Amino acid sequence: MTAEGIDLHLADEPATLALGADLARSCPDGARVVHLTGDLGAGKTTLVRGWLRALGHSGAVKSPTYTLVESYEPAGRTVHHFDLYRLTDPEELEYLGLDGYFDGRALCLVEWPERGAGMLEAPDLIIRLRVDGPGRRAHLQPQTETGRTWLRALSDKWQ
């Protein structure tokens, strides 16, 4: 791991699910916000699916493109999964009552965070995904000390 983060090659969907699972298992106490960026089809929701499965969620995990947020309670931890793709103006987030989601206790996984610029809390971790042939490239960049602690715990397995 460098100060700029970790770069990973994810060969296929199972590798993306595995990264999500390992992020869930290595998530430190105090981690609150993760931004997931990448084009359509880059694997953001797949990563979240792996994450939630590792926490014990057995139901469906779909992108909340139309609802903007889906909330889960796996293993006694609240996780809010946002998809802001359909936002046309960041101020639309005011109608969601963001304070109730970003309460310091829940983990918030935010797809398309750039669409909510200026209205979202700063992330502990930014995960950038992009298509790379049949697989994906992932760049994980810490933004806080909590994010750096998280990546140190993760890097042993993925480097």
Image (cartoon, rainbow, N blue to C red):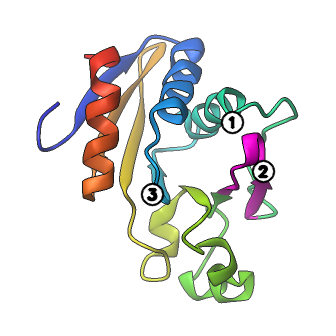
Label 1 near label 3: C-beta < 8 Å? Answer: no
The residue sitting at the left extreme is: 3
In the depicted structure, whether residue 124 falls above or below residue 4? below
As drawn, the label of residue 52 is 1
Label 1 amino acid?
Leu
- Tell whether position 75 is magenta: yes
Residue placed most toward the observer, 110 or 24: 24
As drawn, the label of residue 156 is none
User: Of circles 3 and 1, which is in front?
Assistant: 3
- Quick one: SS at disc 2? strand
Q: Give the range drawn in magenta.
A: 68-81
- Quick one: SS at disc 3? loop
Q: Earlier in the sequence, mark 3 or mark 2?
A: 3
In the depicted structure, whether residue 98 falls above or below residue 1? below
Label 2 amino acid?
Tyr
Residue identifier under label 2: 72
Drawn side of residue 23 relative to residue 146, left or right: right
Label 2 near label 1: C-beta < 8 Å? Answer: yes
How far apart marks 3 and 2 lie (CA) works out to 18 Å
Residue identifier under label 3: 30
Label 3 amino acid?
Gly
Write the residue at 37% across / 51% down: 125
User: Of circles 3 and 2, which is in front?
Assistant: 3
Q: Residues within 10 Å of mark 3 (few under 14, many from 20)?
A: few
Q: Position of residue 130 (x, y in %)?
A: 41, 34
How far apart marks 1 and 2 lie (CA) works out to 8 Å
Residue placed most toward the observer, 155 or 70: 155
Q: Earlier in the sequence, mark 3 or mark 1?
A: 3
